[in-house]
Structures are given as C-alpha cells and as structure tokens.
Image (cartoon, coloured by chain):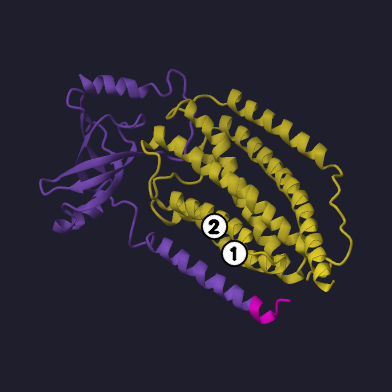
C-alpha cells in the first residue's frame, strides 16, 4: 500500500485554478483571433497557412505533456508518491487528445498542400507511434487493478515511451521526409511569428489547466478506489 | 504487497516489449531504407532500378512541365542538380505544384527512361513568406495551369 493511503483524504483545493483557466481560455481566443487577423495569405499556400496556428501549438503541447509524463513517472518510481502517478496519467490523457488533434490537422493540411492525406514518412510514422504509445499507456492503466502495480507498470511505459519524443522532433532531420523541416525565425516572415508564439503560449497555459483539472478528478477517483478497497478488506475481516 | 523483485521484473518485461516494438517500427525507417531516392541515386542503380515500386524526390525542373488537359497527362522532369528523370503522371497535380517546387512521386522507373507516377506529392518547405507588392498568393497555380494547358 502507499505510505499515505492510511491518512484521511485531503482533496486538492481549487485555489486560483478557476481564474487560471478563465485567463488561459480568454488568452487562447485572443491569440487565435490575433493570428488569423494579422497574418497575410502565404505566398505558396494562401490562407491554408492559418492551419499552422493550431497544428504547431498542438504538436508542441503533445511533446510537453509527454515531458510531464516522464518527470512524474520517474518521481513516482523514486518516491512512491501516488499523486505523481495520477499526474502522469492526467498528462497522458490530455497529451493523447492533442496528439490526435495534431495528426488530424496534419492530414487536413496535407491533402491540399502535399496532395495526399497520409504518407509513411518518418515524421508522420513516428508521430503515429507517439499516439499509439499514449493510447497504450492509457489502455495499460485500465487493465491493471492494483494501484501500486498500475503505477509501476505505467511509469515504466511512460519513461520508455518518452524516448520517442526526441525521435519525432528530430525525424525531419535524421531522415528524408515529406514533412518539412522545423520552422525557425529565419525561415518565415515576421508577420507570422508573433501569432505562432502567442498561440504556443496559449496552448501551453490551456494544457496546464486541462491537466490540473484531470488531476483533481483523478485524486477523487483514487480516494474512492482506496475507500472501496478498505471497505472490502473490512468485510473480509468480519 | 509487491516485492522489489516483481517490480524490477515488471520493468524488465515492459522494457523488452517496448524495445521490440520500437525496433519493429524503426527498423523500417533505418537509414538504408530511405523515404525517397534522388534522381542521381535512382540512375546510379542502373538496371536494378527498373520496374520496382519506388519513391523519387527532387525539384520540378523549371520549364519542363507539359500539361495536357484533354488527356489529363502531366509530364515534367525531376532534378537534384546533377541527375534528372522524366516523370509521367496522370491527373491534375496538387494545388502547389509548380516549376522549381520540391516533389515526391511514387511509381516505377521504366526501361524507356520514363518514371510512371501513380502518386504525385508536393513537398512544402518550412518557409512562410508574405507576398510582396504585386504578387498574388495561391493564384499562381491557376495561371500556370492556364498557360500550360493551352
């Protein structure tokens, strides 16, 4: 059992988080509107370029979420603190949604620009693998009943799966791909950069808020799980 | 109670699974199995390069595009600066297809020296440029098709 499971449940306090969520959401709306209104049509792809302000930030928070899974998983294995496991699970859930969003937007963008929805190049394939690792991680959690063993198994997958994040990032440099290289400030007109940076910041804040909300729910779920276990054990003892 | 022994056993088992899974996936992306060949590399294969499904990547050689809008037949040369291969594709190209654009074509290189494409993909660069005075975005395609079609 976890060291702290004998203590009474101390529910996570909302504190300033509702305000954080509201500010993040308003900032997100502002960033999207700002980016769409201030960026001129791209010379090559016209207004399809606007897709960029969702696709790139979504990809970024996909990586960020897996970074949180990695750190929380290591912390869990070292300290055996159940809360770290719940944080990792919450980040994985949010990250998997954004990873799916990145893939879908990429396909919607690929069709008009590349001419195909999908191609098995290194960037697309490794991103799909990242999505499968996310889904596999979440599936594994639902298969293991014992919270401690669930934490250990999923932490192992969380740590090993994180290897794929730098592979996805570097894939466009390590292999020839259909997907273009990472954009850098030198490869784009300044009109586009501000909108992108704003949206990256907005997506980051929103993601942190989503993970926090999911973590709060996970704490309550786990408290209910522990209470049910305790009740079951009590019945057996008679 | 989980003992230390089963904990590390579980870790090792998951580790083996993930490595095996990763090896399977990335084995196919090994540097020997490249996503596309450049014209120079395909030509260097000689007779080995004929009639095998392959991807060819490079730039559309400026001035080489011939579009027949009746037969929906598109001919152009793909170049990497040194080598050059004539490509024959069916159907209208993607919107961003133009002179000098990076492309990847899937198909077979025939003994007659023509690459028959079954799938034409346009490779976009990581550059985003606002149009300068007088340039009109996304309409160059139409003008290209108009001039090439008649």
Could you say which disc has been placed on residue B51 in the image? none
For disc 2, the neighbor class at 10 Å (few under 14, some 14 to 19, many from 20) is many
- State whether discs 1 and 2 lie on one chain: yes
Q: Which residue is mark 1?
A: A157
Q: Which residues are magenta?
A: B1-7
Residue at image position (38%, 50%) is: A120
Q: Measured along the vertical axis of the image, is residue B39 above or below residue A49?
A: below
For disc 1, the neighbor class at 10 Å (few under 14, some 14 to 19, many from 20) is many
Q: Quadrant of the C terminus of chain A?
A: bottom right
- Residue at mark 1 to residue at mark 2: CA–CA distance: 8 Å
Q: Measured along the vertical axis of the image, is residue B146 above or below residue A190?
A: above
Q: Colour of chain A?
A: yellow
Which secondary structure lies at badge 1?
A: helix
Q: Are marks 1 and 2 in contact (CB under 8 Å)?
A: yes
* Foreground pick, B106 / A44: B106
Q: Which chain is purple?
A: B
On screen, residue A99 versus residue A226, left or right, reads: left
Residue at image position (54%, 57%) is: A133
Q: Position of residue B87 (x, y in %)?
A: 20, 40
Residue reaching furthest bottom?
B5
Residue reaching furthest left?
B112
Q: Which residue is mark 2?
A: A133
On screen, residue B14 versus residue A17, left or right, reads: left
Q: Position of residue B58 (x, y in %)?
A: 30, 44
Residue at image position (40%, 43%) is: A118
Q: Measured along the vertical axis of the image, is residue A123 above or below residue B26?
A: above
The chain to which mark 2 is attached is A
* Foreground pick, A112 / A225: A225
Q: Position of residue A148 (x, y in %)?
A: 71, 68
**Mark count:** 2
């Amino acid at each position: 059992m976890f060291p702290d499971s004998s203590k009474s449940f101390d529910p996570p306090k909302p504190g300033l988080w509702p305000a954080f969520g509201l500010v993040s959401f308003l900032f997100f709306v502002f960033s999207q509107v700002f980016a769409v209104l201030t960026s001129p049509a791209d010379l090559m792809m016209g207004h399809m370029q606007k897709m960029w302000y969702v696709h790139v930030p979504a990809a970024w928070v996909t990586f960020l979420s897996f970074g949180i899974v990695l750190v929380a998983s290591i912390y869990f294995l070292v300290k055996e603190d159940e809360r770290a496991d719940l944080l990792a699970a919450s980040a994985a859930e949010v990250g998997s949604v954004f990873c799916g969003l990145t893939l879908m937007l990429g396909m919607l963008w690929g069709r008009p620009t590349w001419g195909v929805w999908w191609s098995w190049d290194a960037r697309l394939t490794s991103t799909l693998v990242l999505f499968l690792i996310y889904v596999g991680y979440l599936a594994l959690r639902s298969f293991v009943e014992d919270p401690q063993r669930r934490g250990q198994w999923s932490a192992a997958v969380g740590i090993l799966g994180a290897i794929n994040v730098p592979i996805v990032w570097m894939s466009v440099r390590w292999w020839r791909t259909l997907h273009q290289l990472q954009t850098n400030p030198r490869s784009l007109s300044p009109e586009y950069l501000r909108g992108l940076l704003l949206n990256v910041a907005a997506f980051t804040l929103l993601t942190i808020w989503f993970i926090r909300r999911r973590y709060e729910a996970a704490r309550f779920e786990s408290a209910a799980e522990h209470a049910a276990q305790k009740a079951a054990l009590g019945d057996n003892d008679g | 109670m989980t003992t230390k022994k089963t904990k590390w056993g579980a870790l090792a088992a998951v580790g083996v699974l993930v490595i095996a899974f990763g090896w399977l996936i990335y084995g196919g992306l090994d540097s020997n199995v490249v996503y596309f060949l450049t014209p120079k590399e395909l030509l260097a294969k000689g007779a080995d390069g004929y009639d095998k499904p392959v991807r060819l990547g490079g730039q559309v050689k400026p001035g080489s595009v011939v579009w027949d809008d009746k037969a929906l037949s598109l001919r152009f040369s793909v170049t990497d600066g040194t080598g050059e291969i004539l490509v024959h594709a069916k159907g209208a190209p993607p919107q961003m297809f133009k002179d000098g654009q990076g492309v990847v074509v899937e198909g077979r290189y025939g003994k007659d020296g023509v690459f028959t494409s079954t799938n034409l993909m346009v490779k976009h660069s990581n550059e985003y440029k606002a149009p300068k005075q007088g340039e009109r975005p996304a309409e160059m395609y139409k003008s290209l098709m108009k001039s090439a079609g008649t």
